[in-house]
Amino acid sequence: MTAVFLDEDDVATYTVKTIDDPRTLNKTIYLRPPENILSQIELVQMWEKLSGKELSKDTISDQDFLALMKGMYNLDKIYDLYPNFLQSFNLHHDFSS
């Protein structure tokens, strides 16, 4: 599972630039710089490199994950909205590599 990380100032800059660009008229502009698309583990590794410290990481099984979520969220709703959530998110990632 990845996420796109953008700075508000960058979004504002691109938004202003699109105002006078005829190519953007009635278009949706997606800001997804390839170098800013990171998984959670990539973000952690980047933070470790920048800080010079290794962070403590714990892994949990999918059953333990669901047990933690029980009572916090309506799991039926999660499954309805995100049917492939648990399959697409690697809950058994080996952080030692």
Image (cartoon, rainbow, N blue to C red):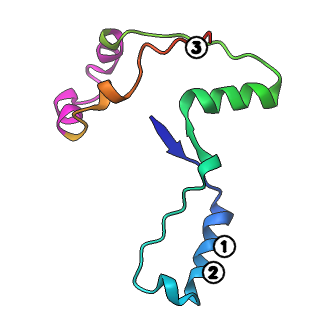
Q: Where is residue 59? Give x, y as percent.
A: 49, 10
Query: In the picture, residue 49 is in which quadrant?
Result: top right
Q: Which residue is mark 3?
A: 95
> Which amino acid, mark 1?
Thr
Marks 2 and 3 sit apart, C-alpha to C-alpha, by 41 Å
| Number of residues whose C-alpha sits closer than 10 Å to that of mark 1, classed few (under 14), some (14–19) or many (20 or more) | few
> Which amino acid, mark 3?
Phe
Q: Residue furthest right?
A: 52
Is label 2 in a helix, a strand or a loop?
helix
Numbered range of the magenta stretch: 64-80
- The relative height of residue 17 versus residue 94 in the rendered view (above or below) is below
Q: Residue at x 68, y 65 (%)?
A: 9
Q: Residue at x 74, y 16 (%)?
A: 54
Q: Are marks 2 and 1 in contact (CB under 8 Å)?
A: yes
- The relative height of residue 97 versus residue 2 in the rendered view (above or below) is above
Question: Which secondary structure class fits the magenta region best?
Answer: helix
Q: Are marks 2 and 3 in contact (CB under 8 Å)?
A: no
Query: In the picture, residue 58 is in which quadrant?
Result: top right
Marks 3 and 1 sit apart, C-alpha to C-alpha, by 37 Å
Relative side of 31 to 69, left or right: right
Q: Where is residue 31? Give x, y as percent.
A: 54, 62
Q: Is residue 76 magenta?
A: yes
Relative side of 27 to 16, left or right: left
- The relative height of residue 19 versus residue 48 in the rendered view (above or below) is below
Is label 3 in a helix, a strand or a loop?
loop
Is label 1 in a helix, a strand or a loop?
helix
Q: Which residue is mark 1?
A: 13
Marker disc for residue 17: 2
Question: Reading the chain from its start, which is encountered first: label 3 or label 1?
Answer: 1
Front residue of 21/40: it is: 21
Q: Residue at x 17, y 37 (%)?
A: 80
Marks 2 and 1 sit apart, C-alpha to C-alpha, by 6 Å
